[in-house]
Amino acid sequence: MSVATDAEHQTYKRRAVISASLGWGLDGFTWTMYGFALTAALPVLNMTNADAGWVTALSVAASALGGVIFGNLADRYGRVRVLTWVIIGYSVFTGLTATAQDMFQFMMWRILEGMTFGGEWAVGAALVAEYSTPKYRGRLLAFIQSTYAIGWAASTAAYLVVFSLLEPEIAWRILFVIGILPAFFAIWIRRNAKDAVTLAENPKQQESFRNRWSKLFTGAQAKRTIFATVLGVGVQGVYYSVFVFLPTYLRDERGLSIVGTASYTWVAIVGSFIGYVSSGFFLDWWGRRRTFLFFFIGSAASVSLFVLTPVAQNALDVLIILVLGFFASGQAGGTGAYLSELFPTAIRGTGQAFSYNFGRALAAFGPLTVGLMAESIGLGSAIMTIAIIGAVIGITALVFLPETKDSVIVDSSEEEKSVTTP
């Protein structure tokens, strides 16, 4: 075994970016199709909006457990290997959702999908973060995050085609079957990508789960872990409360057709992509805390504008939903860079997975509450209320977290164990 040359290192870096981008983009593809399929699955499975809120909440909560499990495995067995496992997992369980005959079966497959879905983001983010230089880490990780919008665009296209050709009672099942396709991309990732830090060859990394877990809550790291998790609650409380119910809101509250729902969703996707990519430049220019603050405030304002502005003309609607996509997704764009800088290498996979996914589990009460509140105050008002609460929670976390712009996350001893070739 020999240490990789600079050229080989750059090749592995590109492959790591491609691998994480594929993983997260395909994750976005399988997850966002859930919102589209839900509109047709509810009546077929005799489910209400409140039932949908429970299914969403439990599947998101399951991602917390899955995130901890797979994050720990990534710290033990390496990023690429575990990334492959989780992509196969969430693809297969998404496909199996098509077989559901009642709410219990639907919930079971969504919970299992959530567990594997929970590990993907943290593992992929850790893989890329350990290759990146401090100066460009924000924009590189934000680009990875932006591929979620590309996956969302793909699921929107699939929704438009499938629901236009088939009756809704069948179309939602076909949509979930399509979700199994990402499993085939895992083969390329496993064969071509390598970890930046070869964990398996470093005895310091071979600690028990108990030791890695205890380090998350020891000394100064405990404060970072707790408030990184609170930040995760805020980020995902905003995101899921808005986008899980967006297709249902556009159909029921705005009276849009399948084509109209898809068209407005495309506008939100364009805004989301711009928001993700832009946040990376802001992260590297302004720093982590200022960027998050900007996008949290913008998210609360844009969601309120979207819900409270009466439907007047198409041009105004398009502009508002574009701005909504920009802020609601942009506030999530910095999580990859920021969380990777809040945890040392030995516990980075475990720490990122815990804070992101446990935060997501708590944030799952957002969609659940939206579903429950919608029965009394309307879906739009429920979405707005929970999104504003999420933004306030996120801003509160920033008060207690440090600025990590330009921080080095791989020390010299770890560099000695960097990517190797046979």
Image (tube, grey):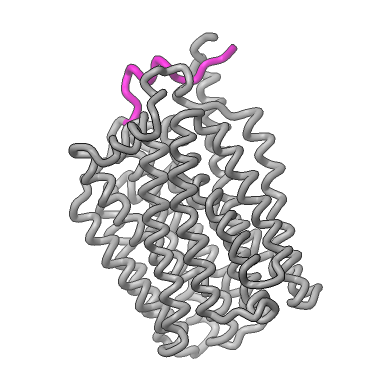
Q: Quadrant of the N terminus?
A: top right
Q: Residue at x 74, y 73 (%)?
A: 163
Residue 374 place in picture, x, y as percent: 45, 84
Q: Was residue 304 drawn as part of the magenta stretch in this picture?
A: no
Q: Residue at x 33, y 31 (%)?
A: 211
Which of the 4 quarters of the picture holds residue 133? top left
Tell me if I can see residue 167 in this picture. yes
Which of the 4 quarters of the picture holds residue 221? top left
Residue 58 place in picture, x, y as percent: 49, 63
Q: Nearer the viewer, residue 193 or 109?
A: 109
Location of residue 75 with respect to 62 vertically, above or below? above
Q: Nearer the viewer, residue 262 or 416?
A: 416
Which residue lies most toward the right here? 165
Q: Was residue 410 drawn as part of the magenta stretch in this picture?
A: yes
Location of residue 144 with respect to 391 vertically, above or below? above
Location of residue 177 with respect to 249 vertically, above or below? above
Q: Residue at x 39, y 86 (%)?
A: 308
Tell me if I can see residue 150 in this picture. no
In this figure, what is the number of numbered marks?
0
The residue stretch that appears in magenta: 409-422
Residue 205 place in picture, x, y as percent: 39, 24
Q: Residue at x 27, y 59 (%)?
A: 293
User: In the drawing, does residue 286 fall left or right of residue 262?
Assistant: left
Q: Quadrant of the C terminus?
A: top right
Which residue lies most toward the top here? 1
User: In the drawing, does residue 305 fall left or right of residue 104?
Assistant: left
Residue 287 place in picture, x, y as percent: 27, 47
